Every structure is written in C-alpha cells, then in structure tokens.
Image (spheres, rainbow, N blue to C red):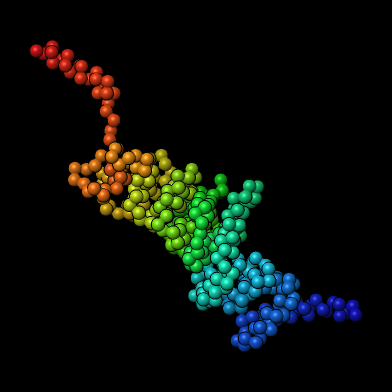
Amino acid sequence: MPAFSLLHPLYSAWQIRQAVNRLDHANSDVRARAEERLCASSPACWPALARAAFGRRTGGGVAAAKLLYDLGDARGLFALLEQFYDRDMYSWYGPHIRRALKQIGEERVLAALETALNRITEVGAEPRTAHHWSLYVAVYALHALSALHADVPPNTWRRALAVHVPFYEDLRACRTALTATWPETSVVALLASVRRTAADALLTLNRPHAFELLREALAHPDPQVQLTALYGLRELRDPRAYVLLQPIAANRHHPLWRDARRVIEALGAKQPDALTLVRASQPAETPAAELLRPARHHTDDPPETLLHPMPPPPEFATGKRVATEDTEAHREN
C-alpha cells in the first residue's frame, strides 16, 4: 500500500504528459481521448498544459493553450495571444490560432488588454521591471484586436495611446521601439511598444477618428507619449497635422522639435512653405471669418491653412501716431 501511494502520483503525471503529447495526434479519436483525460485530471494538468502552450511551437501548443483556457486558466489566452503575435508561429498555424481566439471572443481579448493596462499604471505596483508580463499582454492583445477587426471603445484607445509610468523610459528607448521593423522580444517589453501597437491598431480599426485621438495624445505632458503621437500622425498622413507640428518644430527648446521636423518632411511639401511654417495657432477655436485668406483662394480652403490677422500696434489703436503726423506736417508748412 505505501509503495502504491508513492507510485500513483508519478503514474498520474506520466498519463498527463502522454495526453498532452497526443493533443496534435493525426487521429482525431486519439486527440479526443487525450482531451477527456486532461479534463478529468483538471486542475492537476494545468502546469503541463502551460509548459506546452508557452514552450511548443507546434499545433499541440495551440491545442494546449486553448484547452488550458477552457479549463479555467487565463494563461491559455495569454499563450494564444503570444502565438498569434509570433510571425513564425502564425505562418504555420495562423488559421488555428485565429479560430481559437474567435471562439474565446473579442470581449475576452479586450478584457485582457484592460487588465494589462491597469496593471501597468497601478499605483504601488512594480511593472517597471523588464520583461513584465503586462507589457507583453498589452502588445499582444492590441495586435490581436487589430487582426480580428474588433470594436474598441474610445476610452481604451485613449488609455493605450497615453499609457506611461513616470521615470520609467527615456526618449532613446522610445525611438528604438518606434523605428523597429517588427518589434522583437527585447523591444516589446517597453511602454513605447504598447503605444506604438495602439497607434497601428487605431489606424487600422478607427482611421476616421484617429486624428482627434492622436491630437489628444500629442497634448499629453509626457514627451514619450508625444513622441508616439508624432509616430501616429506620420503614419496617418493627414494634412491637418501641420497645425499641430509647427509649434513643436519651431521651438528649439522642445525635446521633440527635430522629430516634429522629420514628420513634416515625411508628410511632403504639398502646400507652400509659408503655409507650412506659419499657420493659425488655434484654428479650431477661431472663426473662419477672422482668418486671413490668400489673394487667390477657393471657398473650400480649410481654416488651418489660413493666417491670423495681426492686431494693430498700440499707437495706431490710440490715435497718437495720427496726431503726431498731422503736427509735423503743420510745422513744415
């Protein structure tokens, strides 16, 4: 009896490993029996399923991740999101991963994103350490939502575009994340990668409202958030961005003035240099009738391409200059 009590846990663990290995078996009946065995041994099989879900780049890893989530472990969803983000994994098993994520539902993926954003910005928490899981989950979830054409609420866009932690990142690391061709593992563990993925997903899912959301992000006091907004405006290529970029590019004391000039150059010189360099400072708040129009203009000229009228000098406003000129002319006569 004591010997059997010692061997039983070992035998059960061996059965679980065998069942996990058969999840991608060619025979459907073998796969079904393996899933039944794992479901019967839940939650004892969760560690073995998690190792297979995160460690195997095979069809069995996809099946293990989906079964792990169905059994009640949230790590299964995280494993599917990671597999979906992996280009090599997606090239082989993309349809299987996409089908599994659709079965789970876009709402669950969106909830995982919200949880990750809460964990990043949680007061008193320490998401500042490199390779923190919340950074990865946020990037993977945004990528999946973009690929699945999900409906993301505006408040979630605002949170993802402006997520930041004081004194956590610098501009050099942000530029590295924003210029990477495909964010790799070392770059994903950055807040800038979360914001960049949010900007890319925004341009894919909600491009008509992207300018307004990026303008809000550009008004954020954190330079790292502003840099990501510049990246989004460059990818959006909306001519209204000139109005937002000019004050930054003209201020040599701004830490992003060079970046703003590069974005202006990338947008192209579709309008005269005078209108590119000098524009209405707040066209949204100024009536179009109070803006100066060029000598030759069209009635549909947007207000942001027009100039503010200059107020008259104080001496002209008070009439002192006119009185002085009349007195000098009288003396000459």
User: Which sits in the foreground, 249 or 163?
Assistant: 163
**Location of residue 245 in the rendering, given as x and y in whole percent from the top left corner:** 37, 46
Which residue lies at the image location 58% right of the left edge and 55% below the top edge? 117
Residue located farthest toward the left when viewing the structure as drawn: 333
Where, by quadrant of the figure, is residue 52 drawn? bottom right
On screen, 56 above or below 177?
Answer: below
Looking at the image, can residue 276 be seen? no
Left-right relation of 21 to 110: right
User: Which sits in the foreground, 42 or 26?
Assistant: 42
Looking at the image, can residue 312 be seen? yes
Left-right relation of 53 to 192: right
Image quadrant containing the C terminus: top left
Which residue lies at the image location 82% right of the left edge and 79% below the top edge? 8
**Location of residue 203 in the rendering, given as x and y in whole percent from the top left corner:** 42, 59
Where, by quadrant of the figure, is residue 236 drawn? bottom left
Where, by quadrant of the figure, is residue 280 drawn? top left
User: Which sits in the foreground, 218 or 103?
Assistant: 103
**Location of residue 112 in the rendering, given as x and y in whole percent from the top left corner:** 59, 61
Left-right relation of 167 to 4: left
Which residue lies at the image location 54% right of the left edge and 63% below the top edge? 141
Which residue lies at the image location 58% right of the left edge and 57% below the top edge? 114
Residue located farthest toward the right when viewing the structure as drawn: 1
